[in-house]
Image (tube, coloured by chain):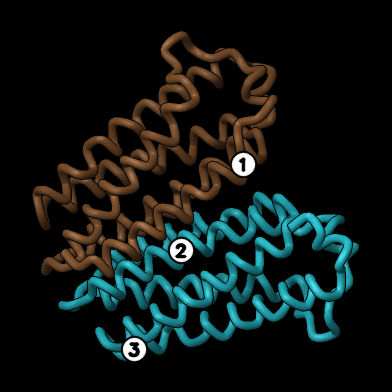
Chain colours: A cyan, B brown
Amino acid sequence: MSWLVFGIFLVACLSAGATGGLFPPGKWYEGLSKPAWTPPNWVFPVAWTTLYLCMAAAGARAAVRPDNSVAMALWALQIALNGLWTPVFFGLQRIKLGLVVLIGLWLSVFFGMIALWQVDWIAGLLFVPYLAWVSTAGALNYSVMRLNPEAAKAG
Amino acid sequence: MSWLVFGIFLVACLSAGATGGLFPPGKWYEGLSKPAWTPPNWVFPVAWTTLYLCMAAAGARAAVRPDNSVAMALWALQIALNGLWTPVFFGLQRIKLGLVVLIGLWLSVFFGMIALWQVDWIAGLLFVPYLAWVSTAGALNYSVMRLNPEAAKAG
C-alpha cells in the first residue's frame, strides 16, 4: 500500500463527506418522525470518519494489485453516489430520491466489496462495515419515508 | 478496455452529473453579472456529455493496465470533487467556496491527466479536453465572484 494513494483516496472520501457539513440535517430533519432505533446524531460523523479510513485503505490496497479494474471503477462509482445522497436528502429534502441514490450506493458498495475481495481479501473485508452502515442508512431512509408520507411527497 | 469497466466509470460520471439537473442555475444565477465570454447555457450539457464519455474511456483504458494506482485514485478524487461543485455553487449559492472546490478539481484533473498519461498515453489525452473545460469553468467562477461582490459575500 502506498501512502500517497491512500491519501488521495482519503481526500476523495473527505470531499464526499464535506456534503455532511455543507448540508446539515437542520430543523426539517429534526421535525420528521424517525424509527425508535435511529442512531443518535453524534454517531454519524464518528461512523463516517471510521468508514472513510477503511474505504481509503481498501482502495489503496487494491490499487497496487494487478487485475483491479472492476474494483477501481466501483470504488469511483461508490464515492460519486456517496457524495450525492446528502445534497439530495438534506439539501433538496427529497426523501424518495434519497432512497433511490442509497439503493444505487448499496449496490456499488456490495459489488465493490466483492470485486475488492477478489483483488485483495483484506480490501474486501475493509468494505464490510461500510456495507453494514449503508444498509442501516437505507433502512433509516426507508423508515423516514414511510413515517412521513407528507414530507415524502416532495419525491 | 472492458465495456463493463467503461460502463461503471460512465455511471460514476452520470451520478456526479445528476447534480446539474438537481441543482439547476435558476433565477439566482440568471441575475448575476457574467463575463462577455460566458458560453451560452446549452453548451454546458453538450460539453459535459462529451467529457463524461472521454473521462469514462480514460478510466477504463487505464484500469486494465499495470501500475495504475495513482491514476485510479486521482480518477476517484476528481469525480468526488466534480459532483461537489454544483450543490455548493448552485445549491448553496456559495461562489467563493465553489471556486475552492474548482481549484481542487482542477488540481485533481491536472495530476490525474499526468498519472493517466504515464499508464496509457491515450487515457492521458482523453483528459485534455476535461482540463480545458475545468480551466474555463474556473475562470468563469472567478469572474462571477469578481463581478458580483455582494452575491459573493455568502462565501
Element on which disc 3 rests: helix
Q: Which residue is mark 2?
A: A79
Nearest to the observer: residue A65 or residue B23? B23
Q: The disc labelled 3 sits on which kind of residue?
A: Ile
Q: The disc labelled 2 sits on which kind of residue?
A: Ile
* Subunit of label 1: B
The quadrant where residue A18 appears: bottom right
- Tell me whether circle 3 and circle 1 mark residues in contact (CB < 8 Å): no
Q: Residue at x 86, y 68 (%)?
A: A148
Q: Which residue is mark 3?
A: A122
Q: Position of residue A127 (x, y in %)?
A: 44, 82
From the viewer's perspective, tell me whether residue A136 is left or right of residue A67.
Answer: right
Q: Which residue is mark 1?
A: B23
- Tell me whether circle 3 and circle 2 mark residues in contact (CB < 8 Å): no
Which quarter of the rendered picture does the C terminus of chain B lie within?
A: top right
From the viewer's perspective, tell me whether residue B6 is left or right of residue A11.
Answer: left
Q: Position of residue A37 (x, y in %)?
A: 80, 86
Q: Residue at x 29, y 48 (%)?
A: B53
For marks 3 and 2, the one nearer the N-term is 2
From the viewer's perspective, tell me whether residue A142 is left or right of residue A118.
Answer: right
Q: Position of residue B8 (x, y in %)?
A: 35, 65
Q: Nearer the viewer, mark 3 or mark 1?
A: 1
